[in-house]
């Protein structure tokens, strides 16, 4: 049902029901891990159980901004 709703709204309906996240504190940490001889081998066992290939990968970051509150509105008008 959710995939149908996404398609109706013009969004891409994904072919899977969930996703995995892998967090690092810094991109340098990720590069060091994948460069290490056994770095990615630590993930292989779980990947075989939970991941479908080919993998879709998204890279992002969080940024903490301290300052004035940014108001927001939801469809029902609450905050």
Image (cartoon, helix red, strand yellow):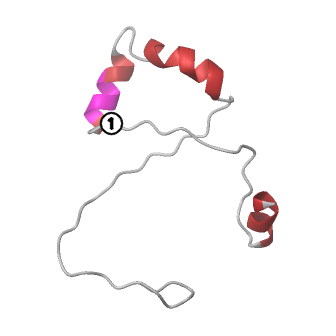
x, y percent for residue 18: 64, 44
Q: Is the residue 65 above or below the residue 16 in the image?
A: below
Q: Position of residue 70 (x, y in %)?
A: 30, 82
Q: Which residue is mark 1?
A: 24
In the rendered structure, the answer to whether residue 60 lies left or right of residue 14 reads: left
Residue shown at 55% from the left, 20% from the top: 46
Q: Quadrant of the C terminus?
A: bottom left
Q: Nearer the viewer, residue 26 or 66?
A: 66
Residue 75 located within the stretch drawn in magenta: no
Quadrant showing the N terminus:
bottom right
> How would you classify the magenta stretch by its main secondary structure?
helix
Up/down of 34 relative to 17, above or below: above
Label 1's element? loop
- What is the magenta range? 28-32
Q: Which quadrant of the structure image shows residue 11?
A: bottom right
Residue 25 drawn at (x, y percent): 27, 39
Farthest residue in the left direction? 67
Asked whether 14 or 72 is in front, the reply is 72
Q: Is residue 11 above or below residue 70?
A: above
Query: Relative to residue 14, is residue 44 depicted above or below?
Result: above
Q: Residues within 10 Å of mark 1 (few under 14, many from 20)?
A: few
- Is residue 15 rendered to the left or right of residue 26? right
Query: What residue appears at the point 46 percent right and 87 percent down from the top-left corner?
Result: 78
Residue situated in front as seen by the camera: 75 or 28? 75
Residue at 29% from the left image edge and 23% from the top image edge: 32
Give me the residue at 62% from left, 34% from top. 55
Q: How many marks?
A: 1
Q: Position of residue 24 (x, y in %)?
A: 32, 36
């Amino acid at each position: 049902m959710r995939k149908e709703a996404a398609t109706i709204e013009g969004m891409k309906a994904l072919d899977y029901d969930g996703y995995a996240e892998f967090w690092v504190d810094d991109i340098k940490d990720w590069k060091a891990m994948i460069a290490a001889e056994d770095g990615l081998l630590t993930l292989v066992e779980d990947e075989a159980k939970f991941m479908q290939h080919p993998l879709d990968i998204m890279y992002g970051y969080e940024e903490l901004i301290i300052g004035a509150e940014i108001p927001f509105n939801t469809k029902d008008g609450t905050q």
